Image (spheres, rainbow, N blue to C red):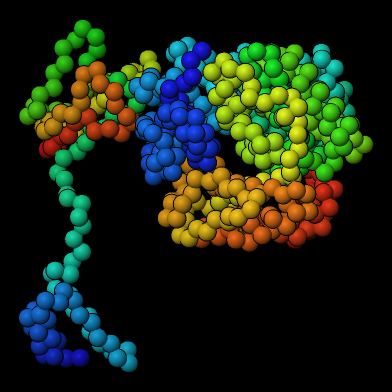
Amino acid sequence: MKPFKKVLIANRGEIALRIIRTLREMGIGSVAVYSEADRSSLHVAEADEAVCIGAAPARESYLSINALISAAKLTGASAVHPGYGFLSENAEFSRAVSDAGITFIGPRPEAIAQLGYKSTARALAMEYKVPIVPGTKGCITKDFAKHAQAIGYPIMVKAAAGGGGKGMRIVRDEKSLEHELNMAQSEAKAAFGDGSVYMEKYVEQPRHVEIQIAADTHGNVVAFPERDCSVQRRHQKLIEESPSPAVTPQLRQKLAAAAMRLVKASGYTGVGTVEFLLDKNGNFYFMEVNTRLQVEHPVTEMVSGADLVREQLIIAQGEKLSLSEDTAEKILCHAIEHRINAEDPDHNFAPNPGTVTALNLPGGPGVRIDSHIYQDYMIPSYYDSLIAKLIVWAPTRAAALARSRRALGELNIGGIKTTAPLHMRILDNAEFASGNIDTGFMERFLGAK
Amino acid sequence: MDTNTLTEIAKWLKTTDLAEASYKKDGKGFELRTEEAEVKSNVPSCSLTVVAAPAVGIYHSAAKGKAPSFKEGKAVAADQPMGYVDMAGEKRPVTASAAGTLKIILAEEGRPVEYGQPLFFIEPN
């Protein structure tokens, strides 16, 4: 397979910029697509070419398969990178891209359908002796109360077709089942176009630990050191770090082995993440596989020295991974990522689109910013509120925390409310600083204010 | 301030090259502007309405086999079909945005267009 001459990025915002950066370093042409609301977006300015594909609402632009395929054909792109969110885990999109004679930078549609669909991934995990949380064998469409009783309350109703906390509901008893079930199904339908749900036992206050993997088309699979993403609000991650303060070298080996076993068994190719829940006794349970590049991938890039977007392109071009298993599992430092959103943390995280009137970004040793905002940029109201990722790395966790504090202190975004001050307050929290946290941390932290 | 004084000041303002003048002391004063002070927008006003591409794709003026029929100077009706954009197999119709005279044709048969790209300009009735 020949190296790509031109890649179209079917996404926007910071991730589109991220992908353009690696494409540029690899000497590959970049095509940005944008909606009417993103005309002045930085990814449009930075790409080699840009095409307006539709009106502001995502379903008329970034979620329009035909518009994206059309733009790819018009610009002669040889490959499409879907980024994260939007259509990145949509098997129909992956198939449509291939049918158009264009390479989809991601797993094959069958792999997305098998591993990306949470219920079938669970079934595969069961087959390959990867521990899972007790739950239904696949999606269920009836006898909900019976299934819930068999698992034992509290249970979690989850959408099979997506993530990001959408279509997920905790049900603590039978009388709340019907209501929560309806909410989960309709939310899933709205977010992913698919209301299918499955159920599993709700593990109380676990840690969320995930393993980044990369697999090429030559049978090589590598696993990177885990990321701990336990700081979440309503299942949306706020802070991610690597390595996890709760993972010992022995546990790390078990997690990596389980992740690689699952990936090898499914024949998955590309970059992906295997998510686990870790309970207080060091037991881990497979949750799901994210068959795409994730928001928090920079954390792993700093810890391992890898360029994960570059690995995606390498894999998609049919080449061998540029890292060996030994290189991938090396821990070079401790890294932390803070997701900065245009939201008001003091008013229930209400979205705060608007104009960035002032901008000062931190710099210096061990600091990385992945962001598409610039001074005088008007943040559109149509899309998610992530405006910047602040990543720091240092030799130890304590040093990384000090660096986070320093960098957040330098960060100044004027004109809009952001969650940056909230991150500062989290850093001052003793529980977070200790590293002994679980997914219940944010609720406790926000409740205690 | 009395009108005589104001008239004097206005006369004086016109003799200068100032566009506006204002004065205030202890809460009293005046503000005068000449015609030149009107902020002129540097966006030229346009009497034409645009017909923009409703999708990203290839523009076709008519269905296959049918002859296209657009000529500058011809009358167009509101919502009159003016071709379609083939967006990866999906045909998105192009319709006249107003009734009037077709003034400018930018659309080219078989050429790629972006969403929102101007295809025609109509002078509305």
Q: As drawn, is B123 to the left or to the right of A89?
A: left
A367 sits to left or right of A94: right
* x then y, percent, for residue B9: 13, 86
Classify residue A124 by image quadrant.
top right
Image quadrant of residue B75?
Answer: top left
Q: Residue at x 32, y 18 (%)?
A: B86
Q: Nearer the viewer, residue A203 or A255?
A: A255
- Which of the pair A398/B34 is nearer the observer? A398
In the rendered image, residue A36, in percent from the top left (x then y), is placed at: 38, 38
Marks counted in the figure total 0
Against A382, residue A400 (above or below) is below
Residue A316 visible in the displayed image: yes
| Residue A160 seen in render | no
Residue A80, given in percent of the width and then of the height, sits at 48, 23
The image position of residue A127, as x and y in percent, is 82, 13
User: In the displayed image of the protein, which residue is found farthest to the top?
Assistant: B65
Q: Residue at x 78, y 18 (%)?
A: A261
Q: Quadrant of the C terminus of chain A?
A: bottom right
Quarter of the image holding residue A287?
A: top right
- Horizontal side of A328 relative to A354 (left or right) equals right
In this view of the protein, which residue sits in the foreground, B4 or A213?
Answer: A213
**Vertical relation: B13 (above or below) A142:** below
